[in-house]
Amino acid sequence: MGEIKDAYKTITKASEGFFKDRGSKFYGYAYPITTEQELKTKIEALKKEHHTARHHCYAYRLKQDYSVYRANDDGEPTNAAGKPILGQIDAKNLTNVAVVVVRYFGGTKLGVGGMMNAYKTAAFEALNNAEIIECTIDLEFELSFGYPEMNTVMRFIKDLGVEISSQKMEMDCKIVFSIRKKEGPKAIEKFTGLKNIRIQVVET
């Protein structure tokens, strides 16, 4: 069985990069995002800021499992812009990130190879100036138990070294705690089969 992936990398805030080739200027912008709508808002703002630019090409990758992505050439030859931008996001193993590269045409055609290199480099510069962090993917569990089981439950929670996010201590008690995804099976095993203690995953 493969190891459970329970961490991902993203950036903390927006960053910028720049590249110039034969008069054409390429402005790279990297953003932390979680939805495509957030990116649309960023692009609308960039189109106002760079209203004379010919192209606003972009790529993004979303979700903690890296499963959602898109690359857009915005009028440039197919795969000459969006794909090299996405390649830089993937080279740094990032998700919940979008990079937009704004191009001002300088009068000299760069050819497909030249364009690919320019978009790739502008994206690289923007991401290179970003602060990259690693985030853990956590599971939330709810424990339901009777008051007499309190000592057992609290001892096991201490053993697991987890943070309690909410608790209700009455005759019928509830505790919600978070734990890294790969430690989830250990938590389930710890509490399963104990009398008057029930554990279940909180659906998010």
Image (tube, rainbow, N blue to C red):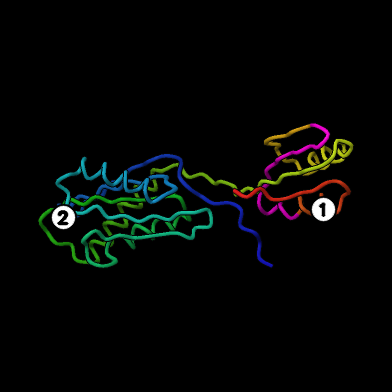
> Identity of the amino acid at label 1?
Thr
Specify the quadrant that holds the N terminus: bottom right
Q: Does the magenta stretch include residue 177?
A: yes
- Residue drawn at (33%, 43%), measured in percent from left and top? 16
Q: Which residue lies furthest to the left in this view?
A: 107
User: Compared with residue 77, is residue 181 higher up or lower down, i.e. above or below?
Assistant: above
User: Compared with residue 80, is residue 121 higher up or lower down, i.e. above or below?
Assistant: above
> Identity of the amino acid at label 2?
Arg
The image quadrant that residue 2 belongs to is bottom right
* Pointer 2 residue: 22
* Pointer 1 residue: 192
Which one is earlier in the sequence, the residue at label 2 or at label 1? 2
Q: How far from the left and from the top, in percent, is residue 63?
A: 49, 54
Camera-near label (2 vs 1) is 1
- Residue drawn at (39%, 55%), measured in percent from left and top? 60
SS label for mark 2: loop
Tell me if mark 2 has few (under 14), some (14-19) or many (20+) residues whose alpha carbon lies within 10 angstroms of its own. Answer: few
Magenta stretch, residue numbers: 170-185
Q: How far from the left and from the top, in percent, is residue 193?
A: 86, 54
The image quadrant that residue 84 belongs to is bottom left
SS label for mark 1: loop
